Image (cartoon, grey):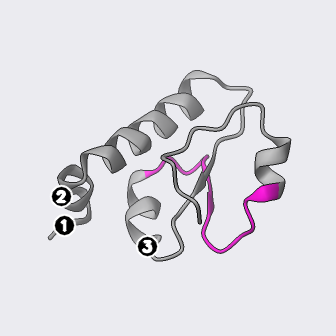
Amino acid sequence: MDLTDEAVSRPRLKIYIDLANYLVNKIKKIKVVYKVHPSESVSIYNKLLDKKIILLKNANISESILKAKFVIHDYCTT
C-alpha cells in the first residue's frame, strides 16, 4: 500500500492533513504544529505534510498547547 493510499483509506487522517496544509499556506503568519500519535509512524506525515509544518512525535504536547492560539484535535487523550 502506498502512503498516499493509506491516508485516503483513513478519511479523517486525510481531512487533518489537508487542513494543516491549507492553514500553513493560507495564513502566512502562523506556525502549524502537527502531533503524531505515539503509536504511528511519521513516514506518512513526512510525505504528505507541507515542509513548513512542525512535526512532533514523542514530544510532550502540553507546552505547545499552552502557547497555542488555536488547537484542533480529534479527542485523543495521549
| Residue 69, percent from left and from top | 77, 31
Kind of residue sitting beneath label 3:
Glu
Mark 1 Cα within 10 Å, few/some/many (few <14, many 20+)?
Answer: few
- Identify which residue is drawn at 78% across, 57% down: 62
Disc on the earlier residue, 3 or 1: 1
Q: Give residue 5's mark.
A: 2
Q: Give residue 41's mark.
A: none
Nearer to the camera, 54 or 60: 60
- Identify which residue is drawn at 43% across, 73% down: 40
Local secondary structure at mark 3? loop
Q: Which residue is mark 3?
A: 40
Q: Which residue is mark 1?
A: 2
Q: CA distance from mark 1 to mark 2?
A: 5 Å
Question: Which mark is in front, 3 or 1?
Answer: 3
Say if mark 3 contacts mark 2, CB within 8 Å. Answer: no
Say if mark 1 contacts mark 2, CB within 8 Å. Answer: yes
What secondary structure is the magenta-colored segment mainly? loop
24 lies above or below 75: above
Kind of residue sitting beneath label 1:
Asp
> Was residue 53 drawn as part of the magenta stretch in this picture?
yes
Question: Which mark is in front, 3 or 2?
Answer: 3
Q: Which residues are magenta?
A: 49-62
Mark 3 Cα within 10 Å, few/some/many (few <14, many 20+)?
Answer: few
- Identify which residue is drawn at 57% across, 38% down: 72
Mark 2 Cα within 10 Å, few/some/many (few <14, many 20+)?
Answer: few
Report the label total. Answer: 3
Q: CA distance from mark 3 to mark 1?
A: 16 Å
Quadrant (top left, top right, bottom left, bottom right) of the N terminus: bottom left
| Residue 11, percent from left and from top | 25, 45
Q: Quadrant of residue 4?
A: bottom left
